[in-house]
Image: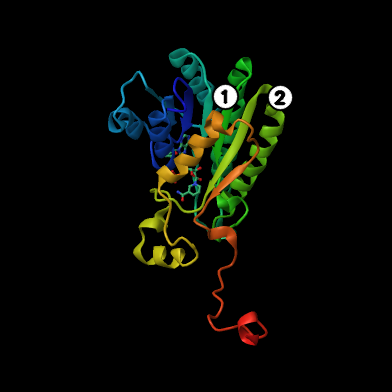
Amino acid sequence: MTLQGKVALVTGAANGIGRGITERLLADGANIVALDVAAGALATLAEELGVGADRLEPVEADVSNRDDVRRAVARAVERFDGLDILCSNAGIADADPFLEISDASWRRIIDVNLTGAFHCIQEAARVMALKGKGAIVVTTSTNGFYVESNLAAYNASKGGVDALIRAAAIDLAWHGIRVNGIAPSMVKTRAAFITSDPVGSIEYLKRVPMGRFADPSEIAAAVAFLASDEASYVTGQTIILDGGLTLGIDMPMPQAPLPGSAKDSA
Ligand SMILES: NC(=O)c1ccc[n+]([C@@H]2O[C@H](COP(=O)([O-])OP(=O)(O)OC[C@H]3O[C@@H](n4cnc5c(N)ncnc54)[C@H](O)[C@@H]3O)[C@@H](O)[C@H]2O)c1
């Protein structure tokens, strides 16, 4: 119970990775303010995770809206008397060929993924700074540096999030607040539709040395570490959780001795 008595705000908590983070932080002892736009999924979250209203406070809110985020942070203070941890995780994507990306789609993705993370970090840090302590973990993506086709707005938003993590880490260190990131590649969630596509998933997994997709619980384990005092001297870092996807271009070498190699000359 490394987070016993801590209070965490998790955004995008009702589904996928955010739900996995919420489940893990609850198991580690934290009380949770669960923020999401999805009112229906949020309403049943506590019951589905087997906790009462004393441990989980749902807040219907949109991270792209400053007032919504401020309200969620205030709720943490009212309900649980403070805020120790922020998991800024809510995110969206559209898949479009570059020449067909609309202004509306571009703006919405930047508003939610990048500006939303900025709102959450700033509002949470204002409260954390009063105590001189806090831990922030932002969900970015391997797409921030290892871009994929037809996802330009998403790639760009996550590149911005990567820079935001490092910038916030430098600026907030003086307030005792650590800011780190997690960068998954493909995690089994509804948003990562390829994970449930029988043909697409086989093709995708050819690029993944570990040969499988991540489970949200595996991403949540890294969040739990970065959010805990076990990571007390870690800031501005992003843990990549990709089963080896971005280690290199996987070009299998022939099994036979290479010309001029040790085996060749033996
Ligand atoms: N699934 C993956 O393979 C993968 C890989 C890398 C990074 N990520 C990132 O992980 C995060 C979570 O993705 P996921 O796969 O769990 O997606 P998901 O769609 O399963 O869950 C996202 C949740 O965020 C909520 N949300 C969306 N817009 C919101 C907003 N404006 N305000 C508040 N809540 C909002 C949704 O309602 C949903 O509950 C995102 O930032 C995503 O970019 C996902």
Say whether residue 116 is visible: no
Residue neighbourhood size for the residue with mark 2, other residues' Cα within 10 Å, grouped as few (<14), some (14–19), many (≥20): few
Residue 176 in the figure: left or right of residue 193:
right
| Mark in front: 2 vs 1 | 2
Residue neighbourhood size for the residue with mark 1, other residues' Cα within 10 Å, grouped as few (<14), some (14–19), many (≥20): many
Q: Residue furthest front?
A: 266
In the image, is residue 178 above or below residue 146? above
Q: Position of residue 175 (x, y in %)?
A: 67, 22
Q: Amino acid at mark 1?
A: Ala
Say whether residue 191 is visible: yes
**Number of residue marks:** 2
Q: Secondary structure at mark 2?
A: helix
Residue denoted by label 2: 174
Residue located at (37% from left, 22% from top): 55
Question: Distance between the Cα atoms at labels 2 and 1?
Answer: 15 Å
Q: Quadrant of the N terminus?
A: top left
Circle 2/circle 1 CB separation < 8 Å? no
Residue denoted by label 1: 124
Please, which colouring scheme is shown? rainbow
In the image, is residue 118 above or below residue 155? above
Camera-side residue: 47 or 259? Answer: 259
- The label on residue 18 is none
Residue located at (42% from left, 49% from top): 191
Residue located at (33% from left, 31% from top): 45
In the image, is residue 23 above or below residue 176? below
Quadrant housing residue 79: top left
Q: Sequence-wise, which precedes: disc 2 or disc 1?
A: 1
Q: Position of residue 41 (x, y in %)?
A: 33, 34
Q: Secondary structure at mark 1?
A: helix
